[in-house]
Amino acid sequence: MERKQFIRTLSFLAFSGPAAWASCKKDDDITPTDETGTDVTVDSSCSVTPAETEGPFPTKTPTSYVRSDIHKGDGLGVEMTALITIANVNDNCNPLPGALVDIWHCDVDGNYSQYGGMQMQSANYQSANWFRGRQVTDGNGLVTFQTIFPGWYQGRATHIHVHIYDGSGKSLLVTQIAFQDSLSIDVNTNGANYGYTKGTSGYIYNSRDNVFGDGVEKEMSTVTGTMAEGFEMKITLRVNA
């Protein structure tokens, strides 16, 4: 069951050196970006990752997009390696091999491929298939995608959609990956050279996002690196399998 209904419509910390934006920190080490944006500590307890709305943008034919490199090909965006581990809560959160993991996210301008003519879209990309892919978890429960740091669009904080299936194709979890407010603000404030030209006017922080607003601790990624060198994102998503 989803925690919320589907949404109807759709800088402050410098990121100048390697940093773990979602590393385990004490409460008094949590850094507020302003009165509405606050970085959170990742909850790594062995419990199922919250389900979220699939959104209007699931990959239509995911079997056609078994690939690790999901770039758009326009050269825009900060390079990001996404390392996603799937763990089985029913097996003491040991890694789950052989799971199918689909991800999809928007480009630097907030557009999704395979869709067009929507309020949030600046162009029609119905015939495009970028920033979408499927991988199968290895013996360590890990899948890897080569992509970019996602952009944002009105009404949502930065996020990546994820749908996890078991090896037979049974749906295990639909969720979303969150990013620390400070990182999203930094990229969209200082990343114009990489194509992030929208700025942050109207940006929705995680706490006010109508998907993430009830907490992102179990969906928060850990990101290291720099815009110049590229990011590495890590997260463990936990399912009942």
Image (tube, rainbow, N blue to C red):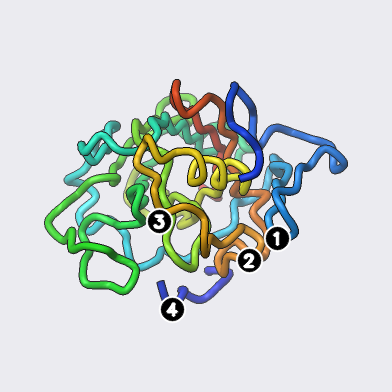
- Distance, label 2 to label 4, CA atoms, is 15 Å
Q: Secondary structure at mark 1?
A: loop
Q: Find out whether the residues at labels 1 and 2 contact each other: C-beta distance under 8 Å.
A: yes
Q: Secondary structure at mark 4?
A: loop
Q: Nearer the viewer, mark 1 or mark 2?
A: 1
Q: Which residue is mark 1?
A: 36
In-front residue for pair 33/10: 33
Q: Which residue is mark 2?
A: 208
Question: Three-letter amino acid code at disc 1?
Answer: Thr
Q: Position of residue 150 (x, y in %)?
A: 41, 46
Label at residue 71: none
Q: Secondary structure at mark 2?
A: helix
Image-based side of 181 in relation to 146, left or right = right
Q: Find out whether the residues at labels 2 and 4 contact each other: C-beta distance under 8 Å.
A: no
Please tell me whether residue 3 is drawn above or below residue 181 in the rendered image: below
Q: Find out whether the residues at labels 1 and 3 contact each other: C-beta distance under 8 Å.
A: no
Q: Nearer the viewer, mark 2 or mark 3?
A: 2
- Distance, label 1 to label 3, CA atoms, is 35 Å
Question: Three-letter amino acid code at disc 3?
Answer: Ser
Count of picture labels: 4
Q: For residue 10, which quarter of the picture?
A: bottom left
Q: Which residue is mark 4?
A: 8
Image-based side of 143 in relation to 60, left or right = right
The mark that comes first in sequence, 1 or 3, is 1
The answer to whether residue 33 is seen in the rendering is yes
Q: Residues within 10 Å of mark 3 (few under 14, many from 20)?
A: some
Q: Position of residue 26 (x, y in %)?
A: 84, 37
Label at residue 171: 3
Q: Residue at x 35, y 48 (%)?
A: 108
The mark that comes first in sequence, 2 or 4, is 4
Q: Residue at x 29, y 32 (%)?
A: 68
Question: Three-letter amino acid code at disc 2?
Answer: Arg
